[in-house]
Amino acid sequence: MLSEPTNEGHAAKHALMQQLEAEVRVCQRCPLAQNRTLAVPGEGNYQSVVMFVGEGPGFEEDRKGRPFVGRSGKFLTEMLKRVGIQREDVYITNVVKCRPPENRDPLPQEVEACSDYLTRQVEQINPRIIVTLGRFSMRRWFPTGSITQLHGQVRNIGRGRVALAMFHPAAALRNPQWEAEFSKDIQVLPKLIARAINANAAAARGEALPAGAPHPGDPDYQPDTNSSVSSSQSEFRID
């Protein structure tokens, strides 16, 4: 189980996510909308502590309106199973929500057009862990460095969250070395998830800061002098 304990806020979160996904399905913000079959907002568990962010829909995704349902999606699902994670327990989305022609790289203006959707997805789902799949999603949270250098690294990204950089499943399938690295890198995830679940449980008890709130090290963090939570208790981070 990779989600938060049930509470009254889940219905509101579900409604907001459904509204956001409906907006994506009719979006006309960039020219990618002109040639799409279906937009692909994302899918999965809205309460999950982990969110996967890929690059953009491919042929099968464009046809079905779902992320990672082609060959690379089957590979991702199998890799998750190998480390004890069910696909339906996580949330999966992409940097761009419509398929670029011939699966070309998304253009900067296309990434920018979808940026607000991804920001809102992160805010609403409020994951502790963001797994970047490929260099385009990696760049959002890892501003410098190449994916061959950064894959497998876990970084604090503020707001009580960490990001794990990984190769895109499609790239892993094209390169045996990268496939081996993908299999190795994903093994970090179960321990991160266990820590994230514990951090959320501590936050629910008032013993730690919740995900999404300013944490020590964030520019807008201000210690609460009336709180019994110490700075060391409040953080979910990698040292």
Image: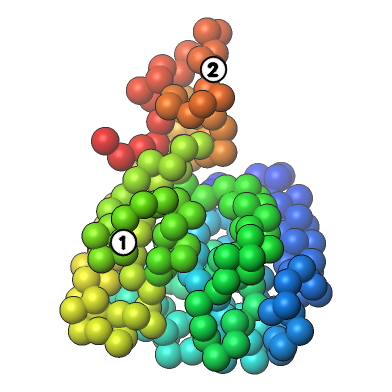
Tell me the amino acid under the disc marked 1. Answer: Ser
For disc 1, the neighbor class at 10 Å (few under 14, some 14 to 19, many from 20) is: few
Residue 204 in sight here: no
Q: Nearer the viewer, mark 1 or mark 2?
A: 1
Badge 1 marks a residue whose secondary structure is: loop
Task: Name which residue lies at 46% across and 66% down.
Answer: 136
On screen, residue 113 above or below 162: below
Residue at the image position 31 percent from the left and 86 percent from the top? 173
Image position, residue 84 (x, y; %): 33, 68
Residue at numbered disc 1: 146
Residue 103 position in % (x across, y down): 52, 86
**21 sits to left or right of 219:** right
Pick whichever, 237 or 147, lies toward us. 147
Residue occupying the far top of the picture: 225
Say what amino acid the circle numbered 2 marks: Gln
Q: Report helix, strand or loop for mark 2.
A: loop
User: Of callouts 1 and 2, which one flags the residue occurring earlier in the amino acid sequence?
Assistant: 1
Residue located 28% across and 57% down the image: 150
> What residue is pinned by disc 2?
222
4 vs 73: above or below = above
The colour scheme is rainbow
Q: Nearer the viewer, residue 87 or 72?
A: 72
Between 213 and 78, the one nearer to me in the picture: 213
Q: Which quarter of the rendered picture does the C terminus lie within?
A: top left
* Residue 225 visible to an observer of this rendering: yes
